[in-house]
Amino acid sequence: MSVSMPKPSEAILKRRAAIVDALCDIVPGEGVVSAANEMAVFESDGLTAYRQLPLVVVLPETVEQVAEVLRYCHREEIPVVPRGSGTSLSGGALPLQDGVLLVLSKFNRVLSIDFDNRCAVVQPGVTNLGITRAVEHRGFYYAPDPSSQIACSIGGNVAENSGGVHCLKYGLTANNVLGVEFVTIEGEIVRLGGRHLDAEGYDLLGLMTGSEGLLGVVTEVTVRILQKPETARAVLIGFPTSEEAGACVAAIIAKGIIPGGMEMMDRPAILAAEDFVHAGYPTNVEALLIVELDGPAAEVDHLLAEVERIGIENGAVVCKVSQSEDERAAFWAGRKAAFPAVGRISPDYYCMDGTIPRKELPKVLAGMRAMSEKYGLRVANVFHAGDGNLHPLILYDANREGELHRAEEFGNDILRLCVEVGGVLTGEHGVGVEKRDLMPEMFGDDDIKHQQRVKCAFDDKHLLNPGKVFPVLHRCAELGRMHVHKGQVAFPDLPRF
């Protein structure tokens, strides 16, 4: 493991048996996993380069059990790492040797569906695709659609503010969550938002979305559901160079066209996906755009013609419009299978996640080619092109000495370049441990301290998911924090502002 985590507490490790017994009292039956061979399945998440066994795993079934586990851990000062389906690609659910791994996979029910108000209330363990499956019989769906949507859970989507191929037009998780119920580290059950479109006061719901398990444990989510558009058609546009494809992306958006989805793949990703899925991709191009238009049929036909015209003006050599729903689905099946497809051409790959201004795509692609030569590693690129969210897949072999380290350094340089051109370290995968030590590339010390003050307001002992996001952890006392509990501030004698 090449990332440093907080040094495990010897005192907690010595109390392990007592901690396991206490958790068994709270979550009886098969709700506690403590044998090393049984915990091995939880030792990593989707970022499989890092592995570590937790102190113990607990799988509660009720909100009251979650609250009691957190109250116990707060009282005994035991770290807690929340985990959903384990598909995180930034090490966000990486366990701690002296920490309880709180797994919410048993929270897997759709609680209610309100078609009149276009929302659904679900537990955090419901899969992303499971929400759409629950409402599609009435012509509705849930818009954010990560490539892992068949497996990733909505609670994890909230924690990481996940995106997907259709988020250009319909927004990220943050734009499609109306409310959450979460439990604080002290065991208090809190509700934010609800079935209404907006809430009064501070945007605490926005604060929780993307908080990576550092502020509370989400136990219920109210999501927006949308009516399926009348028509949806996709077009494949192939280019001789990635730079021309990038210029086409910018030209489409500049024209005022906002596609339902606009994805880009380079040649290595195209070939791997086509060989894997047989989606009908052209194999004689260096870059491929998948552009989907949706809405009324007349509007879709008009915009498709405009997009084709813009593509040709920017050097496209292939334009292939879907002629049926099956063909449109095949176009997207290839894109959504790109990650596993690349896994067939390399023993290992390191999936990065950064976001840049669209106009900087040619510069960043050229930079990545130079880095590929520098590190002697291939890279396959898959982009949420419309919003500038990059997913370079760095190909390496972990069995070869030094290749994992070179892959990590390659990835770090990609993220530094993203920040240099005016972008950010992450678009949807989160910071976790993967990007934690790069935070100073984007934020000054004062910026990070202010973020940690927010953490202190929710978790004064830094017990929730420690070792993630912040490269240097300041104690709350050093930050001059004010922790609010049951309406009382910790230091009532401090002046109010």
Image (cartoon, rainbow, N blue to C red):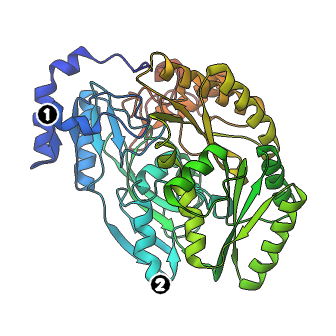
Label 1 residue SS: loop
The amino acid beneath tag 2 is Arg
Position of the C terminus, as image quadrant, is top right
Relative depth, front residue between 127 and 479: 127
Mark 1 and mark 2 lie on one chain; the one further toward the N terminus is 1
Label 2 residue SS: helix
Name the residue that disc number 1 marks.
Answer: 35
Relative to 476, say whether 268 is above or below: below
The amino acid beneath tag 1 is Ala
Name the residue that disc number 2 marks.
Answer: 138
Q: Position of residue 358 (x, y in %)?
A: 78, 46
Q: Position of residue 142 (x, y in %)?
A: 51, 68
Position of the N terminus, as image quadrant, is top left
Relative depth, front residue between 305 and 262: 305
Q: Residue at x 61, y 22 (%)?
A: 376
Relative to 446, say whether 393 is above or below: below
**Residue 379 as seen in the image, left or right of residue 43:** right
Question: How many numbered marks does the figure carry?
Answer: 2
- Packing grade of label 2 (10 A; few <14, some 14-19, many >=20) is few
Q: Position of residue 425 (x, y in %)?
A: 63, 34
Q: Residue furthest front?
A: 284
